[in-house]
Amino acid sequence: MTMAISRYGARVLPNTEQIIADVAARGEFLEGPQVAQFEQAFAAWLGGDVRAVAASYGRMAFHYILMALDLPKGADIVFPALTFWVMPEVARAAGFNPVFADVDPLTFNMTPESFARVITPKTAAVVPTHLWGLPCDMDGILDLARQHGAVVIEDCAHALGATYRGKQVGTLGDAAIFSLQTLKPLNTYGGGMAVAHDPGLAARIATLVAAEPAPTEALVKKHLRLGRMQRVTIRPNVFSFTLFPILWASAYLKWNPDVYFWEKIRPLSPLPMEYRERYSNVQAVIGLEALKHLNEWTAVTQTHAKRVMEILRPVFGIRFPEVPDDRTHAFYQFCAYLPNRDASVLACLKRGVDLETLHVDVCPHMAIFGGSKAPVPGADATTAAVQIPVYESLTPAQVERVAQVVAQSAAAR
């Protein structure tokens, strides 16, 4: 039987369970010296003379950055219209006003031009999001921000390992956030990292983090348990008999089970108590080991994406971002447009290849941000896109199969 291929894959250390057991045996499961060591190693890996501070979530890293910057309350913070709803909601919960700039529908990113259209005297910060792992055009965004006295906070949740003009993302602006969730480029089963250039800003972020309570064993074990369940269920030999039949049936019934996989959209003021814990030592130990493999994982994913592009490029009607010469793409997701998207997705699913339709949000249309019905042309266009599996744990044969199935299904449309 041909195994089904999941839309997601996790980067997993083969000795994860042994690492966890060893840390617990040392009595350093929750607190220990490896948190500081991981922060130092993460900053050194990025380069660019930055300091990194670990947090319980990427969103909390963002919260601490906002608090440490001491921006005027009620000021505008510019986000791309296409982003994960949590980021602008964290800003609003912190007392700021989210403003949305449209995106280029082919790169999925905010552009200097769209940023320029929404700048006002109230603009205090901008959050360029390197969506799916492709860096934004940072020089233009940085120039505009400097002209208007706005702080630049990079959202690198998808983009660890991507570069812009020879520099790692996260070292280009004033500060940056990274996510360390199970499916992200560096997997420590939850957590995040705040990065800053200015030593004073970094010290204030670290002080805010240190004031949070120590992590609880129950919550850390829950993160590890859920992460293990995720990484096991998306392996082809397990996915084929668990989630895949549900997705296959739901496609025919026109029912979307994705709503059960994602976090409930809700106000985040006050911030949930489970957010407010420090990063655990066991996760840091996993992170230290994973950093040693990051370059290799990124290179494999990029090779997979290159092969998919070679196969898809001749197919009429398929479009995907071409990577500019001055940057590299981490390919957290390979996002593309297929002719007759829903029919193409169903055709791929019938042949055992699971494609994700866009899972980030067009925020201006969401009720939590006012539910505007005014068109956001670039972001609205992206709702026709899909994500094609190219993740590191796929074999070359599986990548070939994914690309051929997508190409044949799209060509038939």
Image (spheres, rainbow, N blue to C red):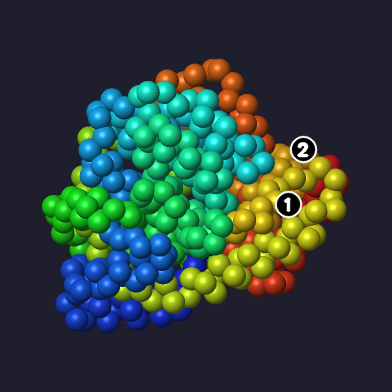
Residue type at numbered disc 1:
Cys
The one nearer the camera, 313 or 222, is 313
Q: Nearer the viewer, mark 1 or mark 2?
A: 2
Q: Is residue 273 visible?
A: yes
Task: Estimate the x, y position of residue 180 in percent, counting from the top left.
Answer: 39, 59
Q: Which mark is first along the chain, 2 or 1?
A: 2
Q: Is residue 178 left or right of residue 158?
A: left
**Outermost residue, front side:** 147
| 335 horizontally vs 99: left or right | right
**Residue 383 visible here:** no
Q: Which quadrant does the N terminus fall into?
A: bottom right
User: Mark 2 is on which residue type?
Assistant: Asn
Q: Which residue is mark 1?
A: 348
Q: Which mark is residue 340?
A: 2
Quadrant housing the C terminus: top right
Q: Residue at x 48, y 75 (%)?
A: 293
Q: Would residue 254 appear left or right of 234 to someone viewing this image? A: right
